[in-house]
Image (cartoon, rainbow, N blue to C red):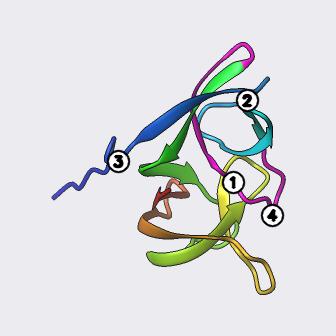
Amino acid sequence: MNVSYDGVGQVCATFLGEKLAEGHVVKLTGNGTVGECAAGDAFCGVTTHCCDDACTVQVCGFVTVGYSDAAPAVGWAALLADGQGGVKAAAAGESGRQMPVVDVNTAEKTVTILL
């Protein structure tokens, strides 16, 4: 049986942001502006479409993103940006954003999370 979370609860907004890649986590960098995250940054959403100096950012709902390091476990997890466009589990002493992880694909190194 296949389970799909595509589009469930999806809320997107348009932000300014140059040279951003689609499918990457981003952080707020100024008024109405987002930028790439460094490793350990808190993120506000995931880019869904980028064109010139603007991008659409999913700020709410289920989304699938890449992860690095160890796979986050299914359930509630504290996540931070990994500096490569994806996420990583917060280490001891780091305060990540708490969110549910509903699917982990270790073959593709992706997680589906609820923003």
Point out residue 3 in the picture as x, y percentages from the top left corner: 23, 56
Q: Which residue is mark 1?
A: 43
Out of 108 and 49, give the one closest to the viewer. 49
Q: Say which amino acid is labelled 4.
A: Gly
Q: Say which amino acid is labelled 2.
A: Leu
Q: Which residue is mark 3?
A: 9
Taking the image as shown, residue 103 lies to the left or right of residue 48, namely left
Classify 79 as above or below 8.
below
The mark closer to the camera, 2 or 1, is 1
How many numbered marks have been drawn onto this rendered protein structure? 4
Q: Write the start and end of the magenta stretch as one range.
A: 36-53
Mark 1–mark 3 distance (CA, rounded to whole Å)? 18 Å
Mark 4 lies on a secondary structure that is loop
Q: Residues within 10 Å of mark 4 (few under 14, many from 20)?
A: some
Label whose residue precedes the other's in the sequence (3 or 4): 3
Q: Which residue is mark 4?
A: 40
Label whose residue precedes the other's in the sequence (1 or 3): 3
Label whose residue precedes the other's in the sequence (2 or 4): 2
Label whose residue precedes the other's in the sequence (3 or 2): 3
> Residue 66 magenta-drawn?
no
**Which residue is situated farthest in the top direction here?**
52
What residue is drawn where x is 74% and y is 58%?
Answer: 82
Q: Say which amino acid is labelled 1.
A: Phe
Mark 4–mark 1 distance (CA, rounded to whole Å)? 9 Å
Examine the rendering and report whether any part of residue 68 can be seen. Answer: no
Q: Residues within 10 Å of mark 2 (few under 14, many from 20)?
A: many
Q: Which residue is mark 2?
A: 20
The mark closer to the camera, 3 or 4, is 3
